[in-house]
């Protein structure tokens, strides 16, 4: 199946462009024995490409975002000439982290939004940036190496970071990502996806149908479009703009027969 035949399966220009660029990277890696990579992708884009790779029976790729459970990842392609463990030892040739250490007076003052808006202000496109790991006195920003010098130089010019220490470091120096879990209980009439998302997103069933159909819901890190999909213990639901939720346990039923579920909101 050639490139144009594959692209016919995708409805939006955005998805066609994503797949077309990916196929180009894959072709170069395969035919020229080079290691190639995409930009950083979100969960929806990764889900689209994973289905494409299954269709093409391609196993010579790695999805990696800098650390285990990273949300934004890039795809690295390689030919049969390379072993996957060789690729894994050379992540530093593709990505790095920019570490920002804030002065004492700014500890706990900046959020993910402050760092991201700073990057947008200096003209960095979102696809060139991976996750931003925020901690008490700073943040680690995962970036493509191709923009590292530009980012460091220009971040130092921003007023918000003028007193900060900004350094380029190898990806293995990233701070350990601490996932906080907030426990919440919800009550639903059934274990259908739309019922649960309605409670988690605190919105109407009508709005939920729109959210699901627009590709903003991920079940176990893959796009899920079926409102009627039944959810079970251990499933992870990601709602774009709302966060990630783990179905911890089915507690029981109310007197009126509704189901009580313990959910962990992964922060």
Image: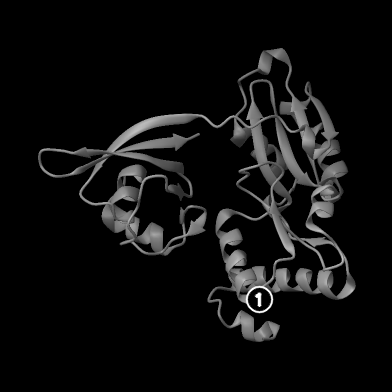
Q: Residue furthest left?
A: 255
16 horizontally vs 198: left or right = right
131 horizontally vs 37: left or right = left
Up the image or down, 87 lies above or below 92; here it is below
Residue at 84 percent across and 35 percent down: it is: 168
Residue at 65 percent across and 34 percent down: it is: 133
Residue at 82 percent across and 54 percent down: it is: 87
Residue at 27 percent across and 55 percent down: it is: 205
Q: Position of residue 261 (x, y in %)?
A: 29, 39
* Foreground residue among 235 and 94: 235
* Foreground residue among 222 and 57: 57
Q: How many marks overall?
A: 1
Q: Residues within 10 Å of mark 1 (few under 14, many from 20)?
A: few
Residue 143 picture quarter: top right
Q: Position of residue 53 (x, y in %)?
A: 64, 69
Up the image or down, 175 lies above or below 220; here it is above
Q: Secondary structure at mark 1?
A: helix
Q: Which residue is mark 1?
A: 56
Residue 10 picture quarter: bottom right
Q: Position of residue 58 (x, y in %)?
A: 69, 70
User: In which quadrant of the rendered image does the N terminus lie?
Assistant: bottom right
Residue 81 picture quarter: bottom right
């Amino acid at each position: 199946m050639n490139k144009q035949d594959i692209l016919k399966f995708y409805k939006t220009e955005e998805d066609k462009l994503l797949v077309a660029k990916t196929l180009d990277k894959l072709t170069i890696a395969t035919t020229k024995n080079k290691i190639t990579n995409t930009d950083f992708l979100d969960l929806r884009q990764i889900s689209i490409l994973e289905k494409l790779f299954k269709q093409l029976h391609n196993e010579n790729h790695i999805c990696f975002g800098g650390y285990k459970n990273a949300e934004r990842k890039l795809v690295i392609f390689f030919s049969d000439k390379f072993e996957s463990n060789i690729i894994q030892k050379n992540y530093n040739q593709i990505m790095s982290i920019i570490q920002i250490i804030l002065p004492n007076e700014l500890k706990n003052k900046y959020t993910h939004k402050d760092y991201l808006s700073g990057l947008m202000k200096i003209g960095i496109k979102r696809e060139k940036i991976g996750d931003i790991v925020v901690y008490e006195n700073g943040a680690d920003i995962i970036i493509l190496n191709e923009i590292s010098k530009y980012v460091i130089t220009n971040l130092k010019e921003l007023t918000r970071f003028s007193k900060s220490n900004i350094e380029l470091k190898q990806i293995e120096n990233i701070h350990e990502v601490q996932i906080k879990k907030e426990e919440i209980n919800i009550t639903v009439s059934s274990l259908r996806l739309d019922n649960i998302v309605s409670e988690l997103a605190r919105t109407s069933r009508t709005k939920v149908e729109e959210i699901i159909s627009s590709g903003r819901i991920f079940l176990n890190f893959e796009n899920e479009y079926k409102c009627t999909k039944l959810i079970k213990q251990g499933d992870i639901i990601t709602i774009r703009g709302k966060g990630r939720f783990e179905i911890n346990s089915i507690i029981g039923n109310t007197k009126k027969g509704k189901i009580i579920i313990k959910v962990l909101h992964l922060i």
